[in-house]
Amino acid sequence: MSRIVDIITMGCSKNLVDSEQLLHLFQSHGYTIYHNPEQVHGDIAVVNTCGFIGDAKEESINMILELCGLKEDGQLNQLYVMGCLSERYLAELEQEIPQVDKYYGKFNWAQLVNDLDAAGSPTSTTSCETAPADRVLTTPAHYAYIKISEGCNRYCAYCAIPIITGRHTSRTMEDILAEVEMLTQRGVKEFQVIAQELTSYGLDLYGRPAIAELVEKMAALPGVEWIRLHYAYPTNFPMDLLRVMREQPKVCKYLDIALQHINDEVLQRMRRHTTRQETLDLIQAMRREVPGISLRTTLMVGFPGETQEQFEELVDFVREVKFERMGAFAYCEEEGTYAAQHYTDDIPQDVKDSRLDMLMEAQEEIANLWAEEQIGRTFRVMIDRIEGDYYVGRTEYDSPEVDCEVLIRCDSADLQPGQFCNACITDTEVFDLFAEVVPAEA
């Protein structure tokens, strides 16, 4: 008799890919699977945790404790935990929350299925060790995330990712391209290329940055319509990637590149290995080499020692550069990092919060002006879903869930999720764009 497993994913899209692979393994072993159910089904629950920053860790722990309560009340039979949080804090979690049946880390989670099989749960002829890297997509059927590497060699002062994931390890091009081909055969058209840091792709395998070559080969595959790049690093940026973005129409003119700060002293203390001028030169080169590129960045406020003047320099930088997309967060000390060992977290939380609000207010003004400038322009739009009276879609300049959405009235056109259309922007509201479909030329 089939048993049911609920997998709950916390944190980033890289975790989501792991969950999708685990869903496939469970399904191939005879389980009925659910992802992020509104209510657990009572058999087995697996929490794929995030351990990046304080808020994310707290959210993961709260989810574990909530499921422990269900288990104690008899509403859940077995509970397992995997992912970044348990990779980093395995011993502590086992001691503090013993109600969990077993903890797995970031890299050994596939063993969970074999462990359950050995305990007498449903089995199949497929072994975890020999199963292909297949996935059950949890995203809409027309787009997927493609994780091209694990780990990071950058060792920024504030970041715990290298502690959790280890050194940068690239997947082979053959493996990645085979996965893309497999997904296009299922109808996936749009690929979000993700990694902890994708600009180092290939260094460990090929002795050179190979992200441009990989993306160019992806763009040549039949069925691929859009490729969007996430989580680049500014230092030693592979400039040949800009040529690919400019020349390949399937590569979205969109780049997610975290800059964190602009003040030279803060950048040095962060161990970012770049300067203000090098950052400005890189942004200028990106906009020159890829006309119309949309840049998304992430910035940090409240890093130890950040003065008011240095913060104001950051705000001025945002107003000067006018990023099309931007996110920001306040510094949170992470044990084991260089910053935690060498700096004092000396900026009060209320000051951090105030600076974060000021920075985001500056970006909101820029975003509103940018949106107003799009009125009258026509874009190719991918329809993601139908919500109320509207089709909800995105342009090539918008990544799912984090960027702007395009709203088209359902009574104005006959569209389906996964379909492209040309749409003219007619109005804006906060971070949404309203549009009307432009009829195709006869």
Image: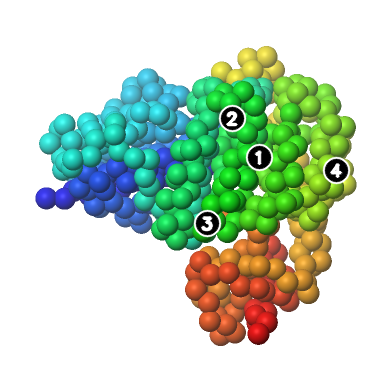
Amino acid type of the residue tagged 4 in the rendering: Gln
Q: Position of residue 240 (x, y in %)?
A: 73, 38
Cα distance in 3D space between marks 1 and 4: 19 Å
Q: Is residue 164 above or below residue 234?
A: above
For disc 3, the marked residue is 222
Q: Position of residue 43 (x, y in %)?
A: 21, 46
Which secondary structure, mark 3?
A: loop
Camera-side mark, 2 or 4: 2
Which residue sits at x=73%, y=33%?
Answer: 237
Cα distance in 3D space between marks 3 and 4: 33 Å
Which residue sits at x=79%, y=44%?
Answer: 286
Q: Quadrant of residue 113?
A: top left
For disc 4, the marked residue is 284
Is residue 171 shown to the viewer in this render? yes
Mark closer to the chain start, 1 or 3: 1
* 125 or 348, nearer to the observer: 125
Mark closer to the chain start, 2 or 1: 2
Question: Is 110 situated left or right of 282 in this image?
Answer: left
Contact flag, marks 2 and 1 (Cβ < 8 Å): no
Which residue sits at x=78%, y=56%?
Answer: 292
Which secondary structure, mark 2?
A: loop
Crowd class of label 2 (few under 14; some 14 to 19; many from 20; radius 10 Å): many
